[in-house]
Image (cartoon, helix red, strand yellow):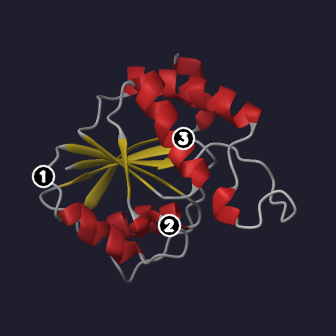
Amino acid sequence: MDLLIVRHAIAFDRDRHRWQEDAARPLSPAGMRRARKAAAGLKKLTARPQRLLTSPLVRARQTAQILTDIAGWPAAEEVPELSPDEPVLAVLELLAKDRSKLTAVVGHQPGLGHLLAACLLGGGGSLPIEMKKNAVACVSFDGKPRPGHAALKWLATPRMLRALR
């Protein structure tokens, strides 16, 4: 299985007066514009995944919807395992049940950085990976997804993706 790991696009700054729950904080207009351009570049860079999983938070769902609309990816499935502060192993257990050849996930930092590190190094390894908003990493597993059994195929910054369109 190949796995595309996508960080959500730029959201509004935290503001408890506008969004009492951080989960409701949406993408900013600039974030939406940049996400559309990045999705157009991503469409040229990689094949369409068979499955798209997203965090239930608004900004991740909006990013996933842009990937569906612009890149032609499948409709997103919300999974609580991609919520902030959820354990990385829960995401890998979910993915291990997936029979798709190419799956994409949309989520948040630092969880996605931890997921990427776990895919490459296993549960005991630590590697500080900071993914910019709207960055995408692609890892490849030999067999079912499990910690430490992936190889990094590529990592694209948002600027690189926007330049591909």
Q: Amino acid at mark 3?
A: Thr
Front position among marks 3 and 1? 3
Neighbour tally class for label 3: few under 14, some 14-19, many 20 plus, Cα within 10 Å? many
SS for tag 3? helix
Q: Which mark is residue 99?
A: 1
The residue depicted at 48 percent of the width and 69 percent of the height is 114
In this rendering, is residue 39 above or below 118?
above
Q: Earlier in the sequence, mark 3 or mark 1?
A: 3
Disc 3 and disc 1: Cα gap in Å? 24 Å
SS for tag 1? loop
The residue depicted at 34 percent of the width and 76 percent of the height is 89
Q: Is residue 135 visible?
A: no
Neighbour tally class for label 2: few under 14, some 14-19, many 20 plus, Cα within 10 Å? many
SS for tag 2? loop
- The reply to whether discs 3 and 1 touch (Cβ–Cβ < 8 Å) is no
Neighbour tally class for label 1: few under 14, some 14-19, many 20 plus, Cα within 10 Å? few
Residue at far right of view: 17
Q: Is residue 134 visible?
A: yes
Disc 2 and disc 1: Cα gap in Å? 22 Å
Disc 3 and disc 2: Cα gap in Å? 14 Å
Q: Which mark is residue 11?
A: none
Q: Nearer the viewer, residue 160 or 34?
A: 34
Q: Amino acid at mark 2?
A: Ser
* Left or right of 61, for residue 73: left
Q: Nearer the viewer, residue 32 or 155?
A: 32
Which residue has dot 3 on it?
63
Q: Earlier in the sequence, mark 2 or mark 1?
A: 2
In this rendering, is residue 85 above or below 151?
below
Which residue has dot 2 on it?
83
- The reply to whether discs 3 and 2 touch (Cβ–Cβ < 8 Å) is no
Front position among marks 2 and 1? 2
> Within the image, what quadrant is residue 30 found in?
top right
